[in-house]
Image: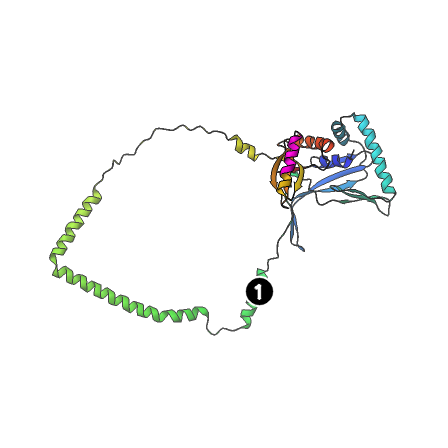
Amino acid sequence: MRLEHYIEELLYRYNCVIVPEFGAFLTQTKSAFIKEDTHTFYPPTKEVSFNAQLVSNDGLLVSYMAEAEKTTYEEMLKRIATLSKDWKNRLETGERLIFDAIGKLWLNKDGKISFEPAVKVNYLTTSFGLSSCVSAKITREILKEQIVALEEEIPFMITPEQRETNQIRPYLKYAAVMFLGLSLGFTGYRFYNENENPKLVVQQNVQTQITRQIEQATFFDTDPLELPALNLKAILNTAVEKSNQTQYYIIAGAFKVKENADKKVNQLRAKGFNADYIGINKFNFYMVSFDSFTDVDQALSYLRTVKKTESSDAWLYQE
């Protein structure tokens, strides 16, 4: 019986887990923060601490383990008391109790229990899958100050705006003269055609009248077209709802080679498990699951069964 595994499972759901006659493991939610010296961002998390003064049994751990181990409450209480006594004896001999997913326990110089929490596990389920990240320092403000200081040291006799204006003005003068000449030539040519070709003027007037009549004509009924009302029934897409639900996977293993992952899936299915390949994690390993659930309580119950009967290395993955 590994008592620390049951403590880990309860820390996901409760803020206080008391080990009778030994102490209590507590969790406190901590907001996201950044370390300015390393420029590292950390997501919200639950910080684990230990209080050696809380030794009274509240029934949570005992009842949870009794149900998981299929035994009575009184029998489980005796087994936990024996294990608590063994932990105390090991600490008094100078040994350190190391729980990978919880932390380290040891006796300090004053004979009191000291605790160092583990940082690789985040018991805050809303932050599952989030990890710390490093952002490079932004230096644009410093560069801007250096450029301003450099501009103050170097005098400019002619600014870029003045030089650009001086270059454009001669071209504007030439363009204005050419535009004036073209306008006078076009006006004179039009005046000559209108006086020398009276028939052309009449044809233009007739064409104008014809165009005006065509624009006033209409070939469509201006009354709006009324369409019958349509009754549409929305069909609920159960697949979309299912995809929006949180999935909990009981992981059987992670493999670097895809063929090994497929082989593991076939082995588990031959044993009767609802095994499947669920994708690649951030370390480029192919993950294989025993089964998947949408309810966290069912997933934890199944995880305990798999640890006892199939693999003690199985763990819970949320997607």
Q: Nearer the viewer, residue 224 or 106?
A: 106
Q: Residue at x 59, y 60 (%)?
A: 139
* Residue 264 is covered by the magenta coloring: yes
Identify the residue at horizontal 80%, vertical 37% (top origin).
23
Horizontal and vertical percent position of residue 269? 64, 31
Looking at the rendered structure, the kind of residue marked 1 is Glu
Residue position for label 1: 145
Q: Is residue 278 above or below residue 185?
A: above
Residue at position x 85%, y 35% in the image: 85
Q: Can the viewer see residue 128 in this picture? A: no
> How far across and down, in percent of the image, does residue 29 sit?
68, 41
**Way the structure is coloured:** rainbow
Image height check: is 155 above or below 113?
A: below
- Please indicate whether residue 173 sits to the left or right of residue 15 in the image: left
Say which quadrant the N terminus sits in.
Answer: top right
Q: Is residue 167 above or below residue 26?
A: below
Q: Is residue 95 left or right of residue 143?
A: right
Residue at x 60%, y 40% (from the top left corner): 279
Query: Residue 215: x, y in percent?
Result: 22, 44
Specify the quadrant of the image occupied by residue 74: top right
In the displayed orientation, state which residue is furthest to the top: 72
**For the residue carrying disc 1, how many other residues have a C-alpha within 10 Å: few (<14), some (14-19), or many (20+)?**
few
Residue 197 in sight in this render = yes
| Number of callouts | 1
Magenta range: 262-272
Of 233 and 147, nearer the camera is 233
Q: Quadrant of residue 172?
A: bottom left
Residue 3 placement, left or right of 274: right
Task: Tell me the SS state at disc 1.
Answer: helix
Image quadrant holding the C terminus, namely top right
Q: Main secondary structure of the magenta part?
A: helix
Q: Position of residue 182 (x, y in %)?
A: 24, 65
